[in-house]
Amino acid sequence: MIDPADSDQLVRLLHKHGVEPKHSLGQNFLVDAAMRDRVADAAGLSANDEVLEVGAGAGALTVALAQRCSRLVAVEFDRHLIPVLREVIGAAANIQVVEADVMRLDLSELFPRGGEVVAGNIPYHLTGALLRKLLETEPRPRRLSLVVQKEVAERWTATTAASLSTIAVQTLAVPELRFTIPASAFHPAPKVDSACVVLEVRDRPAVDVDVLDSFFRLVEAAFQFRRKQLGGTLGRISGQGSSAAAARLRELGIDAQRRPQTLTLPEWEAVYKAFGPRPDR
């Protein structure tokens, strides 16, 4: 049996099909079998689970995930990798290969009830857009288990709202960084280390706001001035002026001199309710 998590076998397999890894598509294949199995285990699958694998590549993780679930949909964008993937999975009956751009794919057709587990080694350039598609579109998956750039995983799991992505992720899911993966575990090796991060999707958002999109827009606007003091930034955004905004922040127990990246998620909820759009404004 071919194991593309073995670097020598992967190189021979790619050469056989005339495939060269494409940097433009973020193709860095996991070639550490023990690490591959840790990634598959982190997905927390049961025999009845359905799985969406994003960026199946040469199929190393595909095979490991399929052994742990009832049905796996392996999505791969690069048509040159499809023959490689099919050779690796062989006659596995529970794997469906889909050649498509996952960003343009209607996932509700593949998983009409939602509740699937999403797994994969995500191309770095696709991370933010893919996360929005998965978490903000109904029906939603119940868990995401992803290999991403270590820095991204650290932002998602930060204790303060270190970035807009931190807020977006923690509003819609409970993230946990499980373990780091060295660059040497991939072929070709990327310039940075990666991490396996698991996101348990929330039944309802972590913030109690009237319109979630409006909440995110306010946060995004504030982060455009991340080096500025919050009082001045919110005064500009809301049109109240910096003095009035500082006074309102003091009422919330928030120092107007703080920067956006220092606030916690509950503090952002309070800021939105004080400065965000409301029907009576």
Image (spheres, rainbow, N blue to C red):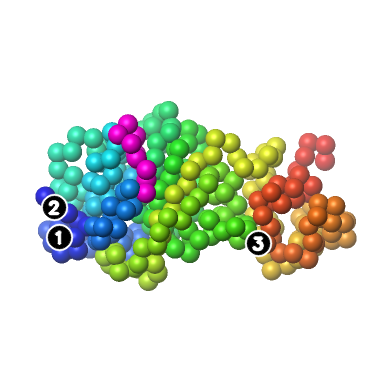
The residue depicted at 74 percent of the width and 64 percent of the height is 258
Instruction: Say which residue label 3 marks.
Output: 261
Whether 279 is drawn above or below 130: the answer is: above
Q: Earlier in the sequence, mark 1 or mark 3?
A: 1
The alpha-carbon separation of the residues under discs 2 and 1 comes to 7 Å
Disc 3 crowd rating (10 Å Cα; few below 14, some 14-19, many 20+) is some
Disc 1 crowd rating (10 Å Cα; few below 14, some 14-19, many 20+) is some
How far across and how far down the image is residue 13, in percent?
15, 58
Q: Earlier in the sequence, mark 2 or mark 1?
A: 2
Residue 2 circle label: 2
Secondary structure beneath disc 1? helix
The alpha-carbon separation of the residues under discs 1 and 3 comes to 45 Å
* Amino acid type, label 2: Ile
Q: Main secondary structure of the magenta part?
A: loop
* Amino acid type, label 1: Gln
- In this view, the residue in front, 181 or 88, is 181
- In this view, the residue in front, 10 or 154, is 154
Left or right, 142 with reference to 231: left
Secondary structure beneath disc 2? loop
How far across and how far down the image is residue 49, in percent?
34, 34
Whether 190 is drawn above or below 279: the answer is: below
Left or right, 4 with reference to 219: left
Disc 2 crowd rating (10 Å Cα; few below 14, some 14-19, many 20+) is some
Q: Is residue 133 visible?
A: no
Q: Which residues are magenta?
A: 42-52
Task: Residue 20: say if magenta.
Answer: no
Q: Quadrant of the C terminus?
A: top right
* Amino acid type, label 3: Gln
Secondary structure beneath disc 3? helix
How far across and how far down the image is residue 268, in percent?
70, 51
Instruction: Say which residue label 1 marks.
Output: 9
